[in-house]
Image (tube, rainbow, N blue to C red):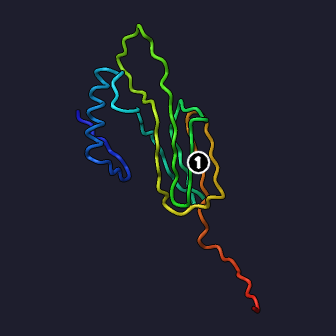
Amino acid sequence: MEYIKIKFGSDFDTVSSSYKETFEEMFRTLNTGFSLCDRSWTPPMDIYETPDEIIVRAEIAGVIKEDLEVEINNKAVRIYGRRCEMSRQDNATYRLAEIQYGTFERILFLPSPIDTEIVSASYLNGFLQIRLARLRMDAVHKIPISDQ
């Protein structure tokens, strides 16, 4: 049975980048010590909305909070971090090694503008959760008129 890999959203990697990744993965399978460059990985993430906020959830088990950075502006969130590789048994034969280590960076463009002053982030049980308040577009501000 064949499996079809489905990705949601748009991922515009360059062709050369995908060839490099395929080449590197092929050799990493044969020899886990092989790497063309520093390892990087892409943690899975969810973005969902409520009427008042946008929530971003990232699965980043094993990442130490001090190795994690979150930056925001009113249109996007940047999540950057590093997961250190656990030591391997020297006398063991690994039959499967799927856990990814190294640096990661995700820039997520938000579906609507947010208020950068009302943001919270928590990290619990391997999940980073960022809560972003939507920017109120319907708020009315009265402007005083001076006599000049």
Front-lying residue, 34 or 127: 34
Query: In the figure, 108 relative to 66: above or below?
Result: below
Badge count = 1
Front-lying residue, 78 or 4: 78
Position of 48 with respect to 15 (left or right) is: right
Residue 53 placement (x, y as % from top left): 59, 57
Where is the N terminus found, in terms of image quarters? top left
Q: Residue at x 30, y 36 (%)?
A: 21
Furthest-left residue in this view: 1
Residue 22 placement (x, y as % from top left): 27, 35
Residue 118 placement (x, y as % from top left): 66, 57
Furthest-right residue in this view: 147
Q: What residue type is labelled 1?
A: Ile
Residue 105 placement (x, y as % from top left): 46, 43
Q: Residue at x 53, y 32 (%)?
A: 61
Query: In the figure, 81 relative to 115: above or below?
Result: above
Disc 1, SS: strand
Q: Residue at x 48, y 18 (%)?
A: 87
For label 1, the residue is 130
**Which class describes the residues within 10 Å of circle 1: few (<14), some (14-19), or many (20+)?**
some
Query: In the figure, 110 relative to 26: above or below?
Result: below
Query: In the figure, 47 relative to 94: above or below?
Result: below
Furthest-bottom residue in this view: 147
Where is the C terminus found, in terms of image quarters? bottom right
Front-lying residue, 105 or 62: 105
